[in-house]
Amino acid sequence: MMSKKKILFVCLGNICRSPAAEGIMHKMIKSEGLENQIEVDSAGTMGYHTGEKADPRMRKHASQRGYDLTSLARRFSPNKDFKEFNYIVTMDNQNYEDIISMDYKNEYSTKVLKMSNFYKVHKIDEVPDPYYSGSEGFEKVLDILEDGCKNLLVRIKNELN
């Protein structure tokens, strides 16, 4: 029996982008019947919102697309998360740099990826933070994350086969 593949999505505060990515990926995994093979979680590089639900605006926009964002914010834990997860997928360049900088011995850099590596439709290098934007910002982030998650899942399914 093959061990589960584990994905961790990371943004700054773990209340907008990474919980949305987690919710989107969770639904995609479930719709493909892969819950026994792939696990998903999210975290933030900062602990500002630890224990809080995702931003109410993100939850509202996500639920309109059928995504349920239930996770509670937590801070990335280098001691635990680097070892536990196969893929650590960051939302923007600063998140990527922050996570890489926590890998003091450079043991886990191959696990740290940018969400932008997985876009097929979008031609941007980051998932923009929608926190200070209106509804269109949250919708745009969901569009980008659906694109990235779909292609990340294809990669993982290929590795499972």
Image (cartoon, helix red, strand yellow):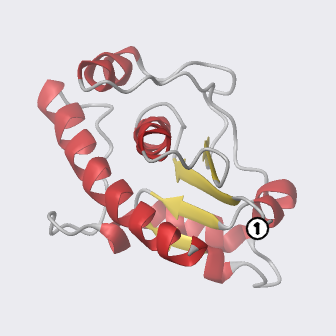
In the rendered image, residue 110, in percent from the top left (x then y), is placed at 63, 82
In the rendered image, residue 55, in percent from the top left (x then y), is placed at 43, 21
In the rendered image, residue 147, in percent from the top left (x then y), is placed at 25, 56
Which quadrant holds the N terminus?
bottom right
Residue 156 lies left or right of residue 63; in this view the side is right
Which quadrant holds the C terminus?
bottom right
User: Which residue has dot 1 on it?
Assistant: 2
Looking at the image, which residue is at 45% across and 45% down?
25
In the rendered image, residue 143, in percent from the top left (x then y), is placed at 20, 45
66 shown above or below 37? above
Identify the element where label 1 is drawn: loop
142 shown above or below 100? above
Using the rendered view, name the quadrant where residue 78 is placed: bottom right
- Camera-side residue: 160 or 152? 160
Looking at the image, which residue is at 79% across and 83% down?
107
User: Callout 1, which amino acid?
Assistant: Met
Residue 34 lies left or right of residue 154; in this view the side is right
Mark 1 burial class by Cα count in 10 Å: few <14, some 14-19, many 20+: few
Looking at the image, which residue is at 39% across and 14% down?
56
